[in-house]
Structures are given as structure tokens and as C-alpha cells.
């Protein structure tokens, strides 16, 4: 019995020795994933806080002119699913450590092919990509460091670095148009009505050949099972082509189906378009 109790006590002591104590991190980890056009952008970093300190200064937490991991703990990691252009520089698809050298007026932005070593190991390496970005003073202060993807467009965005009252913006460009056009060409041969609609909408939104867009949208709307949003697109294309009478006729069909579906937003869209085209016909 004594041996059993001794064994149990010994096992309990080993369990306590191996137990981990979890406490809140001073600089919590953060991961954001953002789609820019057709490209996936992932940012992984740790978020230090100001805590009443001077951050960017000659004698600050981040001294001017010194290499910085751009966050806390490990170096900030950027991952792009496709080739992109960042700060005017070509960046191949992949993962990169982001290290920066801040000064009062501008920062040097350095990207290194990512590895799992200490962030300081990058100091001895030549960056794969390097460029400068201006530093701006914010009207408000961010207590905890923040990196976000902003100003989203089909082929561009910006990566914003903000901490304290400092902001640095990194312009990002992605390639979407050529990919979409390639997808359209591959799909059109044996496509569905929804793909005809998607192709026509893309041509309409990007100012391409509207006659081709009209051919596709009319194929999408052929038959009895018409959809009010697809008819709305056909009327818009006809309107852009200056074929106002036909545009009004299609818009009236779209409005009737919108009312039947209870979609008052599209009813409003169609009424406004019909009024606009009717006015143009009278001139």
C-alpha cells in the first residue's frame, strides 16, 4: 500500500513539473486574411502597445535608423498567393519576413524570404525586396500596433502600418484582369447561363466591348426562367449602347419580376433607369 501511495505521489509531482502556466501575452498574436482582387494576402504579426512610452524616436522603443521586426516577438510575416507589386517593386508569390528601418520622415521596407529562425538572423542577409515609404502623422493615436489591408479595389489595395500617431502606407497592386479574361475564354465554349451573366457583367463593369457583353447577357436571359438581376444587366448594357427603347422594355420586365420577388431595391433601380432613358429619348 505504501508503495502504491509513493508511486501516485511521484506521478503527481511529475505532472506538476510538466504543467504549463498560461498568461496573457504582452504583445498578442494577430493573423488577418484578405482577398485583394483574386489574390490572397495574409499578415501574421504580434501587436505591442504604447503603454505611455515614446515609440518612434532617436531614443524611443523603436530607435530611428535601427532595423525593426515590425511588431514584437517574431518578425512580421507577409504571404501572397500570387505575384504582386508592393511599393512599386515586384514580389513573387510566397511568404516574406517584413523588417523595417524607421526614420522621422520615411521608412525603409525590407522583405526577406521567410524562415523560422530568429528575426535578428535577417540582419545579416540581403533583402529580396527593398523600397522606401513615407511616414505620416495620424490625427489619432493607436495604442496597440495595427496592420490592415485598406483601400480595396479589383487590382489594388494598401497595407497600412499604424502605431501611436505614426502611419506608413505600402501600395499594393495585384493582377486580376488577365486572370478573369483567361477564365472567361475557357468557360465561354460550353458555359452556363450564370457564366454568360458573369462574363457580360465583367465586360460592362470594365468598359469592354458592349456588343459582346450584350450577346452574352441575352444568352443568359434566353428562355422562360428569367432572373430580374440578369434582365437588369441587359437593360444597363442596352442603355450604355444608346438603345433606350429596348433598354426600357427589358427594365420593365426586370421591375415586374423584382416586384414579384419582393426585391424593392431592384424595383427602385429599374424605375430610376426607366425615367433616365425616357428623358433621353425625348431630347
Image (tube, rainbow, N blue to C red):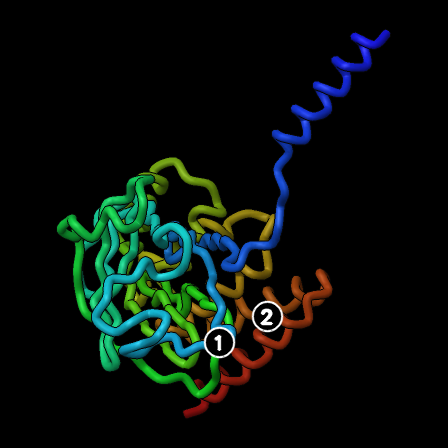
Q: Disc 1 to disc 2, how far (Cα)?
A: 51 Å
User: Residue 34 lies in what quarter of the image?
Assistant: bottom left
According to the picture, the residue beneath numbered tag 2 turns out to be 252
Residue 26 higher or lower than 242, as above or below: above
Q: Residues within 10 Å of mark 2 (few under 14, many from 20)?
A: many
Q: How many marks?
A: 2
Query: Which residue: 29% across, 56% down?
Result: 98
Query: Which residue: 26% across, 63% down?
Result: 100
Q: Is residue 7 left or right of residue 23?
A: right
Q: What is the number of the mark on residue 142?
A: 1
Residue 26 higher or lower than 280, as above or below: above
User: Residue 239 lies in what quarter of the image?
Assistant: bottom left
Q: Please indicate, yes or no, whether residue 133 appears anywhere in the rendered image.
A: no
Q: Residues within 10 Å of mark 1 (few under 14, many from 20)?
A: some
Query: Which residue: 68% across, 31% down?
Result: 16
Q: Nearer the viewer, mark 1 or mark 2?
A: 1
Q: Please indicate, yes or no, whether residue 45 appears anywhere in the rendered image.
A: yes
Q: Position of residue 18 (x, y in %)?
A: 61, 29
- Out of 67 and 222, give the one closest to the viewer: 67
Q: Quadrant of the N terminus?
A: top right
Q: Position of residue 63 (x, y in %)?
A: 29, 72
Q: Is residue 39 left or right of residue 192?
A: left
Q: Position of residue 13 (x, y in %)?
A: 69, 26
Query: Which residue: 33% across, 69% down?
Result: 62
Q: Position of residue 122 (x, y in %)?
A: 22, 49
Amino acid at each position: 500500500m505504501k508503495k502504491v501511495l509513493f508511486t501516485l505521489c511521484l506521478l503527481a509531482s511529475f505532472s506538476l513539473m510538466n504543467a504549463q502556466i498560461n498568461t496573457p501575452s504582452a504583445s498578442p498574436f494577430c493573423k488577418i486574411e484578405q482577398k485583394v482582387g483574386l489574390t490572397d494576402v495574409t499578415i501574421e504579426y504580434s501587436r505591442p502597445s504604447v503603454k505611455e512610452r515614446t515609440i518612434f524616436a532617436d531614443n524611443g522603443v523603436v530607435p530611428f535608423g535601427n532595423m525593426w521586426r515590425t511588431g514584437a516577438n517574431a518578425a512580421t510575416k507577409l504571404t501572397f498567393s500570387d505575384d504582386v507589386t508592393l511599393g512599386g517593386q515586384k514580389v513573387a508569390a510566397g511568404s516574406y519576413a517584413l523588417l523595417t528601418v524607421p526614420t522621422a520622415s520615411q521608412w525603409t521596407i525590407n522583405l526577406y524570404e521567410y524562415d523560422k529562425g530568429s528575426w535578428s538572423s535577417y540582419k545579416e542577409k540581403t533583402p529580396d525586396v527593398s523600397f522606401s515609404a513615407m511616414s505620416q502623422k495620424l490625427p489619432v493615436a493607436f495604442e496597440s500596433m495595427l496592420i490592415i489591408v485598406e483601400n480595396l479595389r479589383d487590382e489594388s489595395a494598401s497595407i497600412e502600418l499604424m502605431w501611436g500617431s505614426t502611419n506608413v502606407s505600402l501600395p499594393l497592386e495585384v493582377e486580376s484582369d488577365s486572370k478573369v479574361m483567361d477564365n472567361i475564354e475557357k468557360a465561354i465554349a460550353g458555359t452556363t447561363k450564370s457564366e454568360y451573366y458573369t462574363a457580360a457583367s465583367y465586360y460592362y463593369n470594365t468598359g469592354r466591348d458592349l456588343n459582346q457583353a450584350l450577346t452574352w447577357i441575352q444568352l443568359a436571359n434566353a428562355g422562360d426562367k428569367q432572373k430580374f438581376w440578369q434582365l437588369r444587366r441587359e437593360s444597363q448594357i442596352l442603355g450604355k449602347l444608346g438603345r433606350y427603347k429596348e433598354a426600357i422594355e427589358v427594365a420593365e420586365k426586370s421591375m415586374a419580376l423584382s416586384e414579384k420577388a419582393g426585391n424593392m431595391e431592384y424595383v427602385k433601380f429599374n424605375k430610376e433607369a426607366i425615367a433616365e432613358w425616357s428623358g433621353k429619348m425625348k431630347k
